[in-house]
Image (spheres, grey):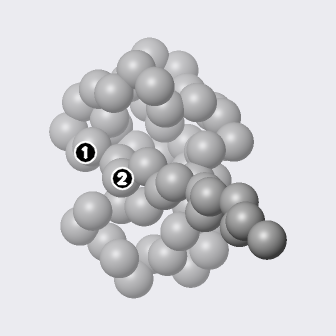
């Protein structure tokens, strides 16, 4: 399990793109609760599924 997943991060489930982007709600051991835009709140076993972390867009330079 990637230890760098923390509440508040935006993630995507690699096998369920139809769920949309999600926001991590809690991380307890290997259990990660994510609130997805299209699927709602889902409990993910991070020992089985490696969530894709979405990077924030870098700030634009003017």
Q: Residue at x 71, y 60 (%)?
A: 59
Q: Which residue is mark 1?
A: 49
Tell me what residue is drawn at x 33 percent, y 27 percent: 2
Q: Spatial distance from mark 1 to mark 2, Cα to Cα?
A: 9 Å
41, 52: nearer the viewer: 52
Please state the horizontal and vertical placement of residue 32, each as a whole percent of the image: 49, 36
Q: Is residue 40 above or below residue 11?
A: below
The reply to whether residue 35 is visible in this rendering is no
Specify whether 53 is left or right of 35.
left
- Relative to 62, is 3 above or below? above
Q: Quadrant of residue 14?
A: bottom left
- Which one is in front, 31 or 23? 23
- In the depicted view, which residue is nearer to us: 43 or 37? 37
Q: Nearer the viewer, residue 13 or 53?
A: 53
- Position in image of residue 33 (x %, y %): 55, 42
CB under 8 Å between callouts 1 and 2? no
Secondary-structure class at tag 2: strand
Q: Position of residue 8 (x, y in %)?
A: 69, 42
Residue topped by disc 2: 52
Circle 1 sits in a helix, a strand or a loop, which is it? loop
Residue found farthest to the right: 62
Label 1 packing within 10 angstroms: few (<14), some (14-19), many (20+):
few
Q: Is residue 45 left or right of residue 40?
A: left
> Considering only vertical position in the picture, is 54 above or below 40?
above
Image disc number at residue 20? none
User: Badge 2 local density, few (<14 within 10 Å), some, or many (20+)?
Assistant: some
Percent position of residue 53, x then y: 43, 49
Q: Residue at x 36, y 52 (%)?
A: 52
Disc nearest the viewer among 1 and 2: 2
């Amino acid at each position: 399990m990637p230890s760098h997943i923390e509440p508040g991060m935006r993630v995507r489930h690699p096998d369920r793109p139809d769920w949309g982007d999600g926001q991590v709600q809690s991380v307890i051991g290997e259990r990660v609760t994510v609130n997805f835009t299209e699927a709602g709140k889902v409990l993910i076993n991070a020992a089985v599924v490696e969530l894709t972390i979405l990077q924030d867009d870098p700030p634009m330079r003017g």
